[in-house]
Image (tube, grey):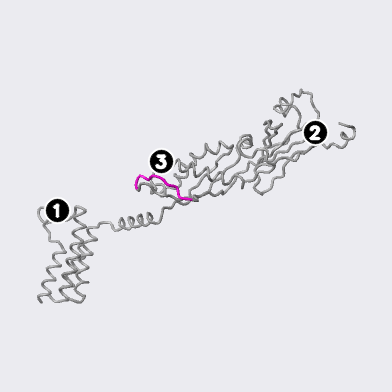
Amino acid sequence: MGIFDVFTKQFIDVIQWTEDDSGTLAWRFPVADQEIQSGAALTVRDTQTALFVNEGKLADVFNPGLYKLNTSVLPILTTLNNWDKAFEAPFKSDVYFFSTREQLDQRWGTTNPITIRDKDFGQIRLRAHGTYTWKIEDPKVFYEKVSGATEIYNIDQIDDQLRSMILTNMSSYMGQDDTSFIDMAANQNKFSENLKAALEEPFLQYGLSLKNFFVQNLSLPEELQAYLAKQTSMNMLGDLKRYAQFESADNIGTAAANEGGAAGMGVGLGAGMSMGQTMMNAMGNGNSGSGGAGSSEEDPMEKIEKLHALKEKGILSEEEFNQKKAELLKKI
């Protein structure tokens, strides 16, 4: 090095990163052909970590604080360069800053449905989406496995990778878990906690810490959703025996009002009674007519049928029949 080179060479005496909100995760301080002055000031802000890298080898890590750089605060770099304790000359080293702030409201979702085996419905195709929050926990691991020697590494560069990792591990977890879809949907907080626990280790492998994970929506194919809606409606009906009886009784008045009079009445009554009896027998609740519980009291449906026959013979008026029918229907 000539005398002219000595005078023109620039030395760095202040090292810092004025972090912005552009989504930058890692930033390499622009050293270029310059050298770091011994005793230079290093400023690491609250949401940052600084890492010194010497010829591709990881060296010293600095957490938030203000440092004066010398051999005493650079023990690993001193060892790598075989410096003695009195060494105070300028030196070369790459310096990387990492943002350790939490990356909030990150989105994840199933681009394609995940096929899982559900204990209630067998194999189903599930869609889901939600949010998660993470941060850089170990800059050394993040540098080695993710950002490397890149001058600027942004959150967009890792976003797809993290979503793929989430969905892969989510599929694996749900394939081993025996929680049904209905239970997942009914308790999404618990399901979110279980998934977070399953994802923490994969995140740590990249030097990241998963702070929270939320499942905001679970959905099924339309045909399975329609089945569940139908099942819910059936549950809301409650006692199907009482429902069938009511339907059969109501058919009497409807059929009598239709064209055909008594003939229509007979068809409606037969169809209604057949439907009601079939449903009750299927549930094991039909009266056998002998020895069954409640057989001592005549069924209101039978009474209505008899009263209708009396009306047809002219023994009862239309008004009397309708009054008795209303009273019997209230007992059903």
Q: Position of residue 112 (x, y in %)?
A: 48, 50
Calculate the distance from the C-alpha at mark 2 to the C-alpha at mark 3: 57 Å
Which mark is in front, 3 or 1? Answer: 3
Task: Inspect the image, locate mark 2, and give the three-letter code of the amino acid beneath it.
Answer: Gln
- In the rendered structure, which segment of residues is drawn in magenta? 112-120
Quadrant in which the C terminus is drawn: bottom left
306 above or below 160?
below
The residue identified by callout 3 is: 177
Question: Are circles 2 and 1 on residues that touch, CB within 8 Å?
Answer: no
Question: Are circles 3 and 1 on residues that touch, CB within 8 Å?
Answer: no
Quadrant in which the N terminus is drawn: top right
Mark carried by residue 151: none
**Front-most of residues 199 and 327:** 199
Q: Picture quarter containing residue 204?
A: top right
Q: Position of residue 252 (x, y in %)?
A: 19, 69
Instruction: Point out the tag, 2 or 3, that comes first from the N-terminus.
Output: 2
Mark carried by residue 37: 2
